[in-house]
Amino acid sequence: DGGITQSPKYLFRKEGQNVTLSCEQNLNHDAMYWYRQDPGQGLRLIYYSQIVNDFQKGDIAEGYSVSREKKESFPLTVTSAQKNPTAFYLCASGPWGTEAFFGQGTRLTVV
Amino acid sequence: GIQVEQSPPDLILQEGANSTLRCNFSDSVNNLQWFHQNPWGQLINLFYIPSGTKQNGRLSATTVATERYSLLYISSSQTTDSGVYFCAVVFSGGYNKLIFGAGTRLAVHP
């Protein structure tokens, strides 16, 4: 199936632990994005990437890290430096400069 | 600063009613999209519309780029239209950075 796959759907993390969220796409899209959404709020941009081995900080990058070693993959690591990581995380991809499409999201809860 | 503002923030309709959602943006854009977020959190693409008018069934959208706004029209609303509608833009010179508005939360009652 073609599309954007985020895994896992639900994730629980203990305080002080790093955790990595997966985002894979098989649509040959150049651009990929990570967003965070808190309950009842809009989407805030964490990181985005236009090409392999290049990525830019968004509006709330502190406490997060990414890599883009392959065109189809853009994993997000939530580090222990992120003080309030519980949120809904959404990944998107799209051809450069045009329409973006979203995965189904990962709900991260710190326990 | 760069802003994307959506109005109204909340909207309640009876089934069958029509509505208009608005998105204002503070600078020229290369890209504008409308999304619907369903109750499970999935973002559904409605329109990619940096300029002009498009229609898809009961939904249509118009972007007037020179006046920096876009409108989403929903006709004959149904309960399944409920959810949050987001406008997102890439500002010209914005290195493909897709920025979202705060959304309009729509509730359609039977």
Image: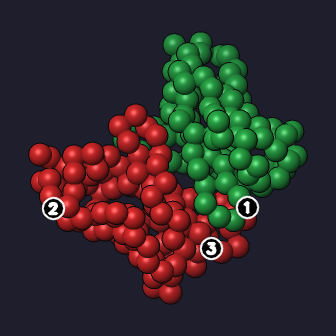
Chain colours: A green, B red
Q: Position of residue A75 (x, y in %)?
A: 73, 33
Asked if residue B34 shows in the view, the reply is yes
Q: Nearer the viewer, mark 1 or mark 3?
A: 1
Dividing the picture into quadrants, the one containing residue A78 is: top right
In this view, the residue in front, A60 or B67, is B67
- Residue B51, relative to residue A49: is it above or below? below
Residue highlighted by disc 3: B30
Q: Is B38 positioned to the left or the right of A80 in the image?
A: left
Above or below residue B51? Residue A49 is above
**Dot 3: within a 10 Å radius of its alpha carbon, few (fewer than 14), some, or many (20 or more) residues?**
some
Amino acid type, residue under disc 2 in the picture: Ala
Q: Which residue is mark 2?
A: B17
| Residue B76, numbered label | none
From the top left corner, tell me how far across and down residue A43 is, in percent.
50, 48
**Above or below for B64 versus B49:** below
Please tell me which residue is depicted at 29% across the width and 50% down the height of the picture.
Answer: B81
